[in-house]
Amino acid sequence: MEGARSLVLLKLIVAWRVASGFDVSPASEFEVSLVETVFASDGKTSDEFGRAVAVFEERIVIGAYNEEESTGAAYVFNSTDFSQIAKLTPVGESDDDCFGCALAIYGETIVVGAAYSIQGEEEEVVTGAAFVFDATYAQIAKLTAKDGGEDDEFGWCVAIHNDTIVVGAPGHESKTGAAYVFVRRNGQYVRVAKLTANDGRETDLFGYSCAVYEDKIVVGAYEAGAAYVFNETYAQVEKLLASDAPEDGSYFGRSVAIYADTIVVGAYGELTTTGAAYVFNGSYVQIAKLRATDGVEDDYFGRNVAIYDDVIVVGTESADDDLGEAGAAYVFGCNGTSSSYVQLAKLSEDGNNLDDDFGLYVAIYEDQIVTRA
């Protein structure tokens, strides 16, 4: 392996979660330990291994969008023994597709975004695509937008829950953006909705981030400083805004995540790029603003967010440490009684190099956290 990038898997021990609330400082009973660092079996430095990460049950999926001259690949690992199970590549794709720039996994289904995939038979157009793989790691579907245009970047973000897949296309219609919803019916994925913001404008980049949980979909439009919520009929039911940040410049909506009734929205431009993440409840009321206890300007806290149950992970681009701007990921937990969030841990890699992007991409499932290193 020629200097290949790695992914760090950390085991999460949530000892502070007690029914009676916090009797002691939760951070004192919260432990995170490094379990494994994994590599692609054929990885190279230029592959961008770790550009996207996802985890579900015993499978970890890692994107490498620049593998094989930018066609890209996604790698599947077993989270028990950390062995590489499969390497996913798209059928019939060409160079520069950016396959692996976005990932999602649920149950036995994996979705991989390829934002620069070329579509069209008579006239080739770079619109993007998303690819679906089953439990045998065979490609079972290629999702595209029939109304897609040049530079739509369809596949820039992907999300899945049960039989529903959401694919973002932030470049659609002069970067106004859109998100497309596909549902599996009789073994086939059928497009059922095209989501847009009811107040969308050019360059909003609606569809830059997306998340889905049961019948609720969240789509970020960070140039508008907003995130939008859609219900089971695909109607817009809420526009989320930060209570204390302007729509422009905070990049609120750069990342989104949802679990049950809780929505998390990253805003890495908040407070001169120190960054923040905002938490909303099922009534779409902001209940918390998360910031790193040691945050400083240009940390870009909130570039990526993930949630499972009442634990939230927030990634940074360049959090300062003793070695420089090496990056970190922060873990927050909620006391179910008071709904207050506290920082439980800062994750960083011992001996990491300057600008190694640790924490830039994060994922969580039960007691496992995955982050790029």
Image: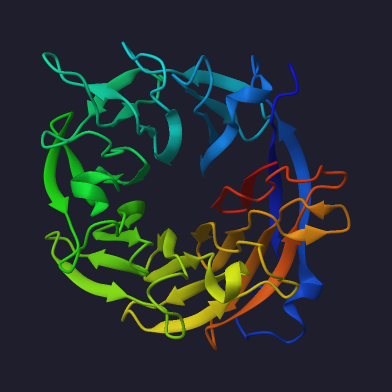
On the question of residue 219 being in view, the answer is yes
Answer with the quarter of the image where residue 330 lies: bottom right
Say which of 206 and 14 sits in front: 206
| Residue drawn at the location 35% of the way across and 34% of the way down | 115
Left or right, 266 with reference to 170:
right
Q: Residue at x 62, y 49 (%)?
A: 368
Q: Nearer the viewer, residue 171 or 154?
A: 171
> Where's residue 38, x and y in %?
70, 30
Of the 4 image quadrants, the one containing the N terminus is top right
Q: Position of residue 309 (x, y in %)?
A: 50, 64
Q: Quadrant of residue 273?
A: bottom right
Q: Residue at x 19, y 41 (%)?
A: 182
Left or right: 358 as drawn, with respect to 128: right
Against 280, residue 66 (above or below) is: above
Q: Residue at x 18, y 47 (%)?
A: 173
Residue in front for this viewpoint, 225 or 313:
225
**Compared to 84, does 265 lie above or below?**
below
Q: Is residue 57 visible?
A: no
The location of residue 86, given as percent across then percent down, is: 52, 19
Along the horizontal axis of the image, is 312 left or right of 23?
Answer: left
Q: Position of residue 369 (x, y in %)?
A: 63, 50
